[in-house]
Image (spheres, helix red, strand yellow):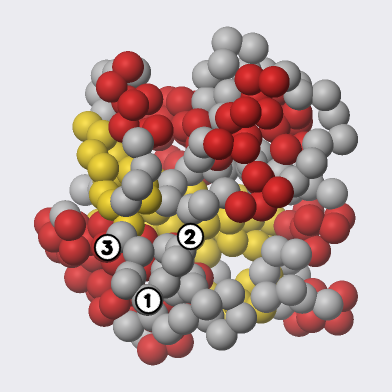
Amino acid sequence: MNDSLIILAAGLSSRMKKSKSSNILSDTILNQANNVEKGLIGVDKKGNPLIHYLLVNALHAGFENIYLVIGEKSSNFRNYFRNNIYEGLNIQFATQFIENDRTKPSGTADAVYQTLVQYPELKNLNFCVCNSDNLYSKKALSKIRTTKALNAFISYDRKCLKFNSEKISSFSVLKLNKENYLLDILEKPSKLDLNNFKDYNGVSRVNMNLFKFNGSAFFKFLKDCPFDPVRNEKELPTAVLNISKNIPNSVLGIPHCEHVPDLTSKDDISLLLNSF
């Protein structure tokens, strides 16, 4: 049984706020891009935010319990869900608190860890995790929800992503064995690296942060996740790689060929506005 989805929405959206758009955006959209969380930016003509479409897809994929991780000073998501009810979904909030010696959240692994501390029942359940600023399809969400693997992620074919080449080149790539279990993750690959980091069929694959975990198996790796030496954050892919190396064949990559719209910069807003 897996009907729980943790949606990560506690990031500071700094890249979105700093970016400039090469397209004309309305004052309303620009104000949202500069002041609210990315998942709350309107992406259609009616002003519905990205989180709306993500939740609709999650509901259709069979999820029932949503744990939305927000910042400790965040009120925008709480205000949104006071005015917008999603029948069939039980939406609860988890708070990612900032540690005393830091000025920003400690990363995505910490966000999931704090959620399991606040909702300890998840430590003994299966659950999925995704970003709030990626629009995952019903098909991808259904695949990750229904997999029988204890720990898994959607393994996207790099060629199916419709981002520009510069953006795609910034994605980390995956090395998988012939059964599609994770062996390694490489950040910022060179062209030579891409020849080595492929699945058994020679396909270059990337992780877009759509995961499934078993709480009892994964909690220790969340708790012990180290800070990345460059970004100074506890990153979820680091915890995933650590469990895969400590327990061989423990993290399955589920092959999938599909684009994943996202909101990283203001130009991404224009792309989504034109797709609805």
Q: Position of residue 52 (x, y in %)?
A: 46, 26
Tags 1 and 2 touching, CB below 8 Å: no
Residue drawn at x 52%, y 36% is: 36
Q: Viewer-proximal residue, 72 or 193?
A: 72
Q: Is residue 248 above or below residue 133?
A: below
Q: Position of residue 90 (x, y in %)?
A: 22, 32
Residue 3 visible, this angle: no
Camera-near label (1 vs 2) is 1
Among the two numbered marks 3 and 1 on one chain, the one whose residue lies closer to the N terminus: 1
- Which residue is denoted by mark 2 in the rendering? 153
List the single residue furthest toward the bottom: 246
Q: Viewer-proximal residue, 144 or 36?
A: 36
Q: Is residue 218 above or below residue 243?
A: above
- Which residue is denoted by mark 1 in the rendering? 101
Horizontal side of residue 15 vs 189, given as left or right: left
**Image quadrant of residue 156?**
bottom right
Residue drawn at x 85%, y 29% is: 23
Under mark 2, the amino acid is Phe
Give the CA separation, mark 1 to mark 2.
Answer: 32 Å
- Which residue is denoted by mark 3 in the rendering? 114
Q: Position of residue 256 (x, y in %)?
A: 60, 51
How many numbered markers are drawn?
A: 3
Horizontal side of residue 275 vs 249, given as left or right: right
